[in-house]
Image (cartoon, rainbow, N blue to C red):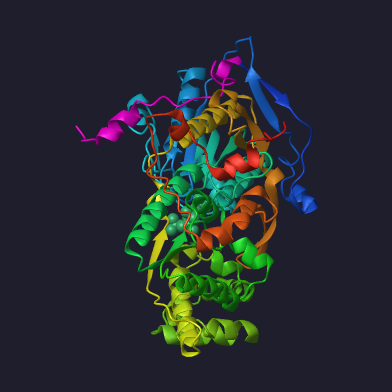
Amino acid sequence: MEKLSPLQIERLKYQPKLPSSLSNGINSLEMTEGSATQSVRDQEQIQNLFKNTYGKPVVTFKTSSAVSSSEVRNVGVILSGGQAPGGHNVIAGLYDALKSANPANRLYGFLGGPSGIIDGKYVEFDDKFIDAYRNTGGFDIIGSGRTKLETEEQFQKSLEVCKKLNISAVVIIGGDDSNTNAALLAEWFVKNNTGIQVIGCPKTIDGDLKNDRIEISFGFDTATKTYAELIGNIQRDANSAKKYWHFIKIMGRSASHVALEAALQTQPNITLVSEEVEEKKMSLESIINYMCDIIVRRSNNGKNFGIAIIPEGLIEFIPEMKSMISNLNDIMASLESDPSFMSAPSMREKFDVVENRLEPSNAKVYNSLPALIKSQLLADRDPHGNVQVSKIETEKLLIEMITTRLNELKSLGDYTGKFSAQSHFFGYEGRCAFPSNFDADYCYSLGYNAFALINFGLTGYLSSVRNLTAPASEWIAGGVPLTMMMNMEKRHGEMKPVIQKALVKLDGPVFKQLEQNREDWAMNDRYLFPGAIQYFGPSSVCDLTTVTLQLEWSKTPANV
Ligand code: FBP
C-alpha cells in the first residue's frame, strides 16, 4: 500500500462544507432565473459569434421540497491550464453530486487537459479512485494541459469521443483562456444539435477570473497564503541578518492580485503593482528611481535590508515594454513557424532578426535590455499567444538596474550604504499546496454545483458560488453565462472572443489598503508573519479567507 504522510491521512478524512441550498442533494433543487445578460464589451461581435448561447440569464439554486428523479447521465471532466489548489475537490464534488442524483451516472476524466477529449484519452472514476484524492493539492488525478480548443476539427473529434462514451455534458475546470474554450465548445455543440452541454468552473491562482458575479477563482486563497508564509519567513530572516534586500517575484501572469494579497498579509517594504505602473505610465527608469529612493532612505536610517514584492506580469505593464512586447508578439506569431529563425545558430542572430523587424522605438527598448531578458522574451508563447512571463526574470533585471543606479548615486556622494540583493520567485511552490479549508470547501461546492447546472439542462455557464465571506452554509450557488464575461482581444495577431481578465482596480479597497500604508511599511518595519496554512484548530485561523475577499465582499454580497 502507498505510504502517506500524517497530514495526507488526516486530510483525506476532511468533509468539505456545502452551501445549505445544495446540502439536501441534487434532486431537491429549484432554479431561479434572472433577466437576460450581455457581454461586458463588444456586444454585437460576441452575440454574432455566440448566436446560440448569448444573452442567457444568471441562475440561482435553492432547496425545493419536491424531490425529482434524474435521468442517467455520463459526464466528462477536464482540468485545464496551470495547477491551482482544490482542483481534485471540484472533481470530488462533481462525482458526489452525480452519484447522489443517480448511482448509474458515470464520470469520465479526460487526461492531460483539453487534448484528452480530442484524442479520446480518459479514465472512468469510481469511489476508490476519487477517495484517494479528496482534499489533496495538485492536478495529478488526471493531469492538465493548455491546448486551445478552437478548430472545427478539434470540435468534431471531441464530439466523436463524447458519442463513444455516451457523454452528455463536459465540465472544463480552468481560467479565463480555458473557459473561453468552454464557451466556444458549448456554442459549437448547440449549433450542431449534439445535445452535449458544457459547464466551466473558475480556476486560477491568479485571481483574475472574477467579476461582480464571480467573487474569486479557486486556488487564490491557498496560493496566496503559501506565498505569504514564505515571505513572512524571509522577512524574519532579513530582520535577523540585516544584510540583504530580498527581491521576491510572485506568480500571477497578468494581474497583480496575488502579489497584492501576499503583501497585505505580510506588509513588506516595497510592493510594486503592475496596474499602477501602467496607469501612472511609469517607465522602467522611474520604477528604479522609486525603489532606489526607499533603499537609500532606509540605508540612511541604518537599514541596509528590506523586502520588495514584484508581480510576475510587471514587465508587460511598463508602457515602453508593453508596446515593445505587443509588437514582438505579432512578430513572433510568424517567426515561430519560420524554420530559419527557429534554427538560427546563435541568440545574437535571433536578436538581430527581431530588432530589424521591430518598430524603431520598440527596437530601441528591446536593445537596451540585458541579453538574458532579451532571450527570455523570445521564449515560446503559450498556446493562447501569451508571453510566458514566469520565464522572465524581472526580479534580476531590477536588481541589476538598481545596483547600477546606486553606484551612480554613490559616485555623486548621495548614497553611502551597502546593497546586497537576493532574488526569489514564488510561483510553483503555491500551485499544488494542500487546499486550505476555504479552497477545499469552495472547490467541492463548485464541482457539486456544476452538476446541478448540468441537471437543469444548462450549457455555456460558469459554476458560481457566492457570498464567500459568510459561513459556507450561507453561500449562494448558481450559474453565470460565459458569454457575459467576454470581449474581443488581440491574440496571435488576430481579434478573438475571450473572457475579460479582471485587473487590480486602483480605486478599489484592496489597492487603497496598500496605498494608505506603504510609506509606513517602507520605512518602519511592520512585517507580519502569517505562518503555515492551518487545517485543524480554531476557526479564526483555519477558516480565514483572504484580505482581498474580505475587503471586496464582506459588506456587499453579490446581487442575484
Ligand atoms: P492559469 O491561468 O492557467 O491558471 O495559470 C496561471 C499560472 O500559474 C500563471 O500564474 C503563470 O504565469 C503560469 O500559469 C505559468 O504557466 P506554466 O504552468 O505553463 O509554467
Residue in view at x 42 percent, y 45 percent: 530
Q: Quadrant of residue 237?
A: bottom left
What percent of the width, then of the height, locates residue 555? Answer: 67, 35
Say which quadrant the C terminus sits in: top right
What percent of the width, then of the height, locates residue 67? Answer: 60, 10
Residue 315 placement, left or right of 390: right
Residue 311 appears anywhere in the view: no
Residue 517 or residue 131, whichever sits in front: 517
- Total numbered circles: 0
Residue 360 appears anywhere in the view: yes
Residue 556 or residue 165, whichever sits in front: 556
Give the main secondary structure of the magenta stretch: loop
What percent of the width, then of the height, locates residue 198? Answer: 59, 37
Say which quadrant the N terminus sits in: top left
Residue in view at x 40 percent, y 49 percent: 229
Residue 336 to residue 95: above or below: below
**Residue 7 magenta-highlighted:** yes
Residue that protrudes farthest toward the top in the picture: 66
Residue 297 to residue 364: above or below: above
Residue 66 to residue 76: above or below: above
What percent of the width, then of the height, locates residue 76? Answer: 49, 35
Residue in view at x 40 percent, y 57 percent: 235
Residue that protrudes farthest toward the front in the picture: 301
**Residue 417 magenta-highlighted:** no
Q: Quadrant of residue 470?
A: top right
Magenta region: which residues?
1-28
Residue 470 placement, left or right of 249: right
Residue 557 placement, left or right of 234: right
